[in-house]
Image (spheres, coloured by chain):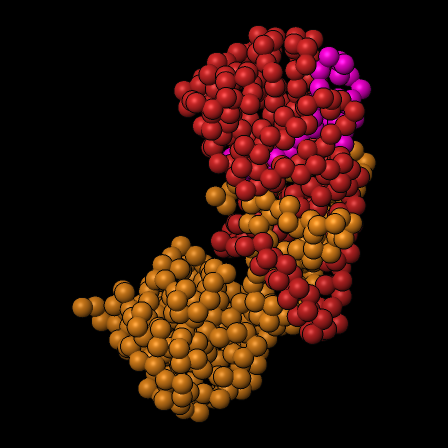
Chain colours: A orange, B red
Amino acid sequence: MKKPIIQKLAIIGVGLMGGSLALSLKNGGYVGEVIGIGRGIENLRNAFNLGIIDKYTQNLKDGVIDADVIVVAIPVESIVDIIDKAQTFMKDGAIITDVGSVKGEIVKNVDKILDSRLAFVGGHPVAGTEKSGADAAFSTLYKGSKCILTPSKSTKGEALEKIKLMWEKTGAEVIVMSTEDHDKILAAISHLPHMIAYSLVNTVDGIDDFDESIINYSAGGFKDFTRIASSSPEMWRDICSMNKTAIVDMIDRYMKELSQLKTLIEEDSHNEILDLFSKSKKARDSLG
Amino acid sequence: MKKPIIQKLAIIGVGLMGGSLALSLKNGGYVGEVIGIGRGIENLRNAFNLGIIDKYTQNLKDGVIDADVIVVAIPVESIVDIIDKAQTFMKDGAIITDVGSVKGEIVKNVDKILDSRLAFVGGHPVAGTEKSGADAAFSTLYKGSKCILTPSKSTKGEALEKIKLMWEKTGAEVIVMSTEDHDKILAAISHLPHMIAYSLVNTVDGIDDFDESIINYSAGGFKDFTRIASSSPEMWRDICSMNKTAIVDMIDRYMKELSQLKTLIEEDSHNEILDLFSKSKKARDSLG
């Protein structure tokens, strides 16, 4: 057996993200023992029965006390709080990382509160599905995806290298950047599409010119397109709050682009419309 | 064997839409003979080999001369032209229908040019995938979908009943409405999402604040969301031209909705944001 790169790994929040990380590392033999920490006992039992974790507890202290690495995989708005509560129980030199899809607010606040005995590496594996919970976890979730790490003043010693190696072992490509760059990029490729989808569904749902709700006419295309509007409203409310500036900026850029298209349609500028659509198709096709 | 409801069916344009209709009717025994008419000989041969059509020709006259029903399944901007060219060869009492996703412009112009010996029923089966060509056709494409028919002054005698029955036999639910209602509904559930997707890809692709194109960070969600931006630029240029008023109206309604969300984010109105997202999730979840 290979020597694990992490002896004791604690996962706070054994859902799709945390659970898939644990599965991938366990399957590869890269981790000695995984302890799952969570509030819901059903989900923890599930995760244990699915082989995602080796032990579980609802007690934060018991869960983190021996851990070499602690991965915080809970909703973004609770990450700083739980690190603050748990840090006093952690052993010297323990490394904390997270998987939150917003980095500026989290890293800034962890930097403020973190005990100097500990190290923190802000992280965000850019992967996921619309499903959640330990049931949804699978070992190849991160394979071929990008994982962004945003080191800061709390990122001490070997912490960055260790967390980088951990993600690389899941098959992810690790990219290191500033929290600002991360938050801008995510606003564009993830947060903006969610704002767009929520607004589209509400626009169509709000049309009351017809007897029947016209959303019932929608075919597969509309359903696929608006699937992300089924995402957790609470989670997205919090992301809007924590990445406000970048999201508002991206909505502005987007509305400029859409206004431009609207003007071209109004002016019957067929060639320019064809150019715009062709440019878009080319960029989209490049993604596969 | 059942008595077919259509003896001789001509399909002008044996692609996904026309081919799937032919397959479904042939499989059910609802049609005596299907003649495929098209410009590309390869696609016609393919359709023949796949059992979609019984005969094929590149000659419009030979194709339509004996047909009882002629289905025009080609791009929207060519539908009126081809009906105009082909009608002189059609036999008295022949019924023409189309599958174009815009109805006002097409029906208005067919009403102007159609010979009084013939009948026309504007039609639009609301189904499809992003694929095209006879290869993409399958017999269950229309099962459970809605098919909208928009009768007009050219819709004479038994024409509406016959075309209604034809679509019902594919498993579609047939709904009869005005061309105006059709064009508004489609603008909302199909044309607007395409405008949104094209604009989103161009917005993200146009961000040049980073060394690498940030579109490369996109994960599954972005790819699914923007899949429709891979649709044919020519087709969508033509739809924009032919359903201009309704599309511009829907873009306006949509931008109002998105602006409102932007304001709520700027003002930290977390409860209102949660309400908006929850409303959207509920409407989206109802679609399954």
Q: Is residue B140 above or below residue B279?
A: above
Report if residue B116 lies within the magenta region: yes
| Point 66% across, 30% down: residue | B123
On the image, the x and y values in percent for residue B119 come to: 71, 19
Q: Residue furthest left?
A: A1
Q: Quadrant of residue A195?
A: bottom right
Q: State left or right for residue B110 relative to residue A46.
A: right
> At 77% from the left edge and 27% from the top edge, which residue is drawn?
B152
Front residue of A5 and B256: B256
Instruction: Look at the image and give the residue range highlighted in magenta.
Output: B104-131
Outermost bottom residue: A88
Kindly identify the residue that appears in the image at 78 percent across and 17 percent down: B113
Q: Position of residue A248 (x, y in %)?
A: 70, 63
The answer to whether any part of residue A75 appears in the image is: yes
List the single residue furthest toward the front.
Answer: B2
Give the x, y percent position of residue B111: 78, 22
Look at 52% across and 11% down and name the residue there: B57
Question: Residue A206, relative to residue B33: is it above or below?
Answer: below
Give x and y (percent) for residue B36. 53, 17
Residue A237 is one of the magenta-drawn residues: no
